[in-house]
Image (cartoon, helix red, strand yellow):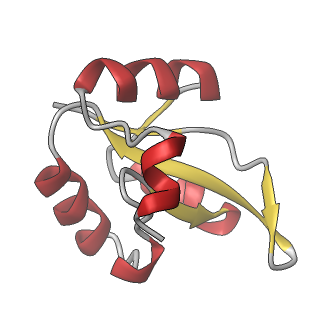
Amino acid sequence: MVILIDQPMWPAHGRLWAHLVSDSDLGELHAFAQAHGIPRRSFDLDHYDVPQEAHARLVAGGAEHVDGRELTRRLIASGLRVPARDRRRNR
């Protein structure tokens, strides 16, 4: 079980954002996020959106930095990925 984070490169609200995911367990992801001060409102069905300024702190806290393709590949392999078609239904 590993927490993964990609490079902050997604612009929104005047800053860049990264994605924080688990490769096996949402409970583990929520616990990691809570322990590192990431609010639950940042959770988006299968990942947390985290601001660029939190990236280094999360890596120092144990998140493994991977590129976006690797993060997506491992999220899909975990079975936790919520496909786009299901995302629209859950909004």
The percent coordinates of residue 64 (x first, y second) are 41, 33
Q: Residue at x 67, y 40 (%)?
A: 7
Q: Nearer the viewer, residue 39 or 46?
A: 46
- The image shows residue 63, relative to residue 35, as above or below, that is above
**How many numbered marks are there?**
0
The reply, left or right, for residue 82 in relation to residue 88 is: left
Residue 40 seen in the figure: yes
Q: Give the quadrant of residue 76.
A: top left
Q: Which residue is drawn at 54% across and 62% down?
A: 49
- The image shows residue 78, relative to residue 38, as above or below, that is above
The percent coordinates of residue 84 (x first, y second) are 53, 43
Q: Which residue is drawn at 62% across and 29% down?
A: 68
Residue 59 seen in the figure: no
Q: Nearer the viewer, residue 51 or 62?
A: 51
- The image shows residue 3, relative to residue 57, as above or below, that is above
Q: Which residue lies furthest to the right in this view?
A: 14
- The image shows residue 52, relative to residue 83, as above or below, that is below
The reply, left or right, for residue 43 in relation to residue 28 is: right
Q: Residue at x 54, y 26 (%)?
A: 66
Q: Which of 58 and 68 is in front in this view?
A: 68
The percent coordinates of residue 1 (x first, y second) are 15, 31
The percent coordinates of residue 59 (x first, y second) are 46, 46
